[in-house]
Amino acid sequence: MERLKSRRAGADCLVVGASFAGLASAFALARSGLRVAVIEKKTDPGSKLHTTGIIVKDAIDRIALLDTLPTSLLRRISGVRLYAPNLHYVDLEAPGYYFLATDTPAVLRWLAGQAEGAGARILCNTAFKGAQRLLSGFEVAGFGTARFLIGADGPRSRVAGALGLGRCRRFLAGIEYEYAGAQLPASDKLHCFIDRRLAPGYIGWAFEGVDGVQAGLARRADGRTTFKPRELMAAFLAKISPAIELRSLKPTGMRAGLIPCGGIVAPVAASRALLVGDAAGMVSPVTAGGIHTALQHGLAAGYAAAEFLQGRAQDPCGGFAQAYPRFRVKRLLRFLFDHFQSDLAFNMLLATRPMRSAASLVYFHHKGVFDSAGRRERPATRRELTLPVDDPNRC
């Protein structure tokens, strides 16, 4: 990656943050023939990530940019195994629906390569230090002039702060361990664990990814409780050990961070400026998934900004930004889960039709069905993980 130090530069559009949303925006702008630069404070777009990296089938179906994504960076997961607090579980699936676990650092590096191939400049080791408005754009400290500015720099967006745009206020705090070379029982499932004590307002999870197992949990970050990641992970791994035993393994990596869960921020745009991705709060309030929406709306924001800069459309800070997802139903589900989550209710109702319908909405967008095996009991014995073998589920 090219590194920008003290010299000044300029661009038609400056994208702040080499995130999924930022790189998608840069790709769209560059494909439209504009001069675009991406500044990223990290040394590499794939380093120090905070995302689990699961892509839903809808993204593959609807985003042509992903058509050439190498299959070696993906692993198919066909369904969900949902555990009640007492570790009884049900298997959920939808015909033709699946999730893709990813080698997330490699996917982001691939996406950066796509943006560079289209003509964008990726400038790492370069932090956003502020911007002053000009008659036709911005003077960006340490960079130069830009006619348009896109903030894709995460939930604590500096672009939002500099331009007086909305900031994310509600978060989940998450932590995830990685276990290279490990496998799971029922490796074709995304294992999801409900537990109000360990993960209030969200869930714990485990799944077999491209190069091993990823396991973690997230919980409401409301300022009333202290988030102690390692203690929580120790308690979580002990809790799930009758179903999935990971405690004997040493984590090879760890991710932790804040996940916005309050919906789209307001305002999300200003004249010649847009927020996208996590900076815009573009994350499902229920599932905390944001890669699909980041790519979809990042591309759309890039093309909208390009049309404006080429004189073919109005500034997208108006009508375009109003088309961002509002997550109305999922914000309602988030409210209900925050205020009425009950371990006893989940233990009793996990296999009922209302619970299955809610799970279908959350995981499969109403496509889910309850498999024929019915209610499952907690495993009687612990199952040790084994070394990886050739996996027929790998894409």
Image (cartoon, rainbow, N blue to C red):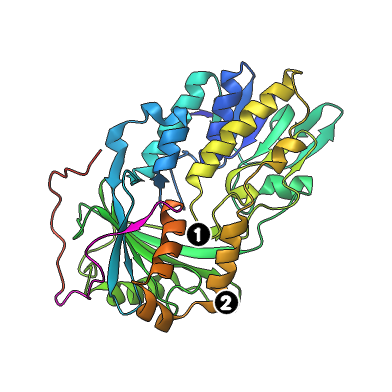
Q: Is residue 83 left or right of residue 310?
A: left
Say which quarter of the image contains residue 225: bottom right
Q: Is residue 21 left or right of residue 67?
A: right
Q: Are marks 1 and 2 in contact (CB under 8 Å)?
A: no
Q: Earlier in the sequence, mark 1 or mark 2?
A: 1
Magenta part of the chain: 366-381
Relative image position of residue 163 (x, y in whole percent): 77, 45
Residue 378 falls inside the magenta stretch: yes
Quadrant, the C terminus: top left
Mark 2 lies on a secondary structure that is helix
Q: Is residue 91 above or below residue 19?
A: below
Q: Is residue 295 above or below residue 242?
A: above
- What residue does disc 1 label? 257
Relative image position of residue 260 (x, y in whole percent): 58, 58
- What residue does disc 2 label? 339
Q: Amino acid at mark 2?
A: His
Q: Is residue 361 above or below residue 314?
A: below
Residue at left offset 60%, top offset 54% = 327
Relative image position of residue 270 (x, y in whole percent): 78, 40
Q: Magenta part mainly helix, strand or loop?
A: loop
Estimate how packed mark 2 is, as few (under 14), some (14 to 19) or many (20 or more) residues with alpha carbons within 10 Å: few
Q: Nearer the viewer, residue 142 or 68?
A: 68
Residue at left offset 41%, top offset 84% = 344
